[in-house]
Amino acid sequence: MYSVMIARYKYFPEVKTKGMSAAPRLILFTSEHSHYSIAKAGAALGFGKENVILLSTDERGRVIPADLEAKIISAKQKGYVPLFVNATAGTTVYGAFDPINDIADICEKYNMWLHVDGAWGGSLLMSRKHRHKLNGVERANSVTWNPHKMMGVPLQCSAILVREKGILQGCNSMCAGYLFQPDKQYDVTYDTGDKAIQCGRHVDIFKFWLMWKAKGTVGFEQHVDRCLELSEYLYNKIKNREGYQMVMQGEPQHTNVCFWYIPPSLRNIPDGEERRERLHKVAPKIKAMMMECGTTMVGYQPQGDKVNFFRMVISNHAATKSDIDFLIEEIERLGQDL
Amino acid sequence: MYSVMIARYKYFPEVKTKGMSAAPRLILFTSEHSHYSIAKAGAALGFGKENVILLSTDERGRVIPADLEAKIISAKQKGYVPLFVNATAGTTVYGAFDPINDIADICEKYNMWLHVDGAWGGSLLMSRKHRHKLNGVERANSVTWNPHKMMGVPLQCSAILVREKGILQGCNSMCAGYLFQPDKQYDVTYDTGDKAIQCGRHVDIFKFWLMWKAKGTVGFEQHVDRCLELSEYLYNKIKNREGYQMVMQGEPQHTNVCFWYIPPSLRNIPDGEERRERLHKVAPKIKAMMMECGTTMVGYQPQGDKVNFFRMVISNHAATKSDIDFLIEEIERLGQDL
């Protein structure tokens, strides 16, 4: 949300004083798989949801750059102004990484703001093995990263990193004399409050700083690598196992492992309406039973035309392979008679 | 900020989908003494700061209702749409309470959204003795209240209360299927996330709930009454004391006690540029010395054409009269040779 506001300020600073109605119709672009906060930002900041254009993705849920360029050209032809592209590094459901370098090329060509939503996947930058999935992130104008997701920092801890120095000040500064007195006895450049959108707030970053001091960069790298190793273990265990069907082919890019469990009663029913309807109810039922038993828990959701499937996400590096084994056994124990 | 968005949605729901440019020029009204977050909301949500109209106040810092009505009429004559009035219950500097009932009458007449910013002063509702200062708050469409200010709840804990049921859902709901699954095994009306602007967030209200359980409503009333009693004690002690000058006449409405300390060297200088310039530097110097000594601390700021003055605010009910006595002694000890 913040990044969209910053982009607006950068290219249309008069909006801060004169309002959106003084600006042309501004268009935001984001993956059809991106987090709902992008559409919400469009509504909240006065752009309108209709001006948030969803981009098509490939079979792994990654934005197709050619589709972005086509939609930019189409918007311009209508007289609109393409303003902002959000590239997601680690989508919520599939854990997909959009091709940032290709998107950055297009943003440069059309003079648009490039934001990278690394809320979930940004933590892979901590890993020498996995950081290549974010190649091109260094070209972004802004990046979000939520250490409260992958890094295990307690809720909430969200960072926004902005390339251009002074732009946060320009966007947000209101110079309230009763708070940001210029005649304090200390160096007031440490008064960062006037740069932010909120006033009184929790020092969320302190928790993360403390963890970083304690674990070190190497500790964080081990954390990330371990989580990805466990999801790979899960993927390899179920990809050819009887009763399982993967939502997409190939190794997951992040720790998101998306799959259907097919109970024996459905295994011989051919693909069609009846099977889909019954399969849609399997994951919610198994999760409900897990909650009643109190043994484990795994999320599910539908996506597009795909019926409810499990999405196993690992962010706790203290999890073990036997935890993964147990999860599989538990799904089978609870689901076999459905 | 949130309340302005809600008002916009209520009267111009199409903004959520089509954007601000589809709406006429919408005008917000707020006191010249109100918190800077109102102007910031105007900028952030796409209204523009120029469309946030500041209202004149009386000598105690309270909005003059006739000025509000005149400015509404003037905006309408220009073809603009008056949308929203913010009445402050407890301004940041003076602790002033705007006359909510008079403002509510005007909002009803012109079909505008009435918001009460009770961030600082809303806590007086806990006190049978002081709650009359918020008379009319029951007529507001929305109210903000920050228990992290007067009630001593650790940062951050901010509540927004909205009269119309369902409007938060209408404003914010994005129905993200991967988060707010309708087929959960429990009553999903407890999934309040889709009503809020943020996604993952801290359960801030829990701290407050726990304190309320522990102290009770009567305990909170004692807390509020005690703080106001201490500020009255300070006011009475310095209002006629040599070397002090009150910023406004009469007992403070909230715990804000605003005053100048006049060092002996300035007492015989007649009012004028030289005295003003020198007086402006007194409060910052005394505060800096307090910080160096580590004894106590009290805020200051200029306001309008008034040079820097102290603003003593009491929100800790464990403070005592001897703490107040010490504050006065300390100001005099540190300031006597300035």
Image (spheres, coloured by chain):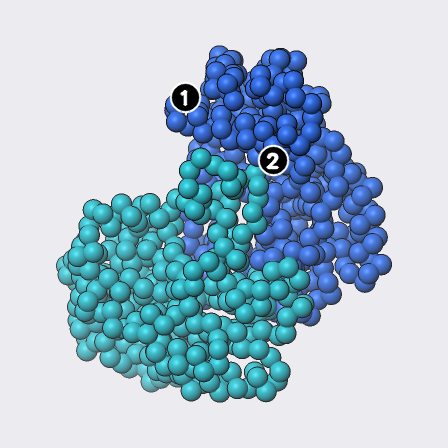
Chain colours: A blue, B cyan
Q: Mark 1: few, some, or many residues within 10 Å (few <14, many ≥20)?
A: few
Q: Disc 2 or disc 1, which is closer to the eye?
A: 2
Residue B191 point in image, percent of width and height: 45, 44
Residue B274 point in image, percent of width and height: 40, 79
Residue B89 point in image, percent of width and height: 35, 69
Nearer to the camera, B66 or B325: B66
Write down the chain letter for disc 1: A
Q: Which residue is mark 2?
A: A302
- Could one spot residue A81 in this view of the protein? yes
Please tell me in which quadrant of the rendered image residue B254 appears.
Answer: bottom left
Label 2 – label 1 distance at C-alpha: 24 Å
Residue A105 point in image, percent of width and height: 80, 42
Nearer to the camera, B146 or A142: B146
Q: Residue at x 65, y 18 (%)?
A: A268
Can you tell which mark lies on residue A197? Answer: none
Nearer to the camera, B222 or A57: A57
Kindly identify the amino acid type of the residue bearing the numbered disc 1. Answer: Thr
- Could one spot residue A207 in this view of the protein? no
Q: Are marks 2 and 1 on the same chain?
A: yes
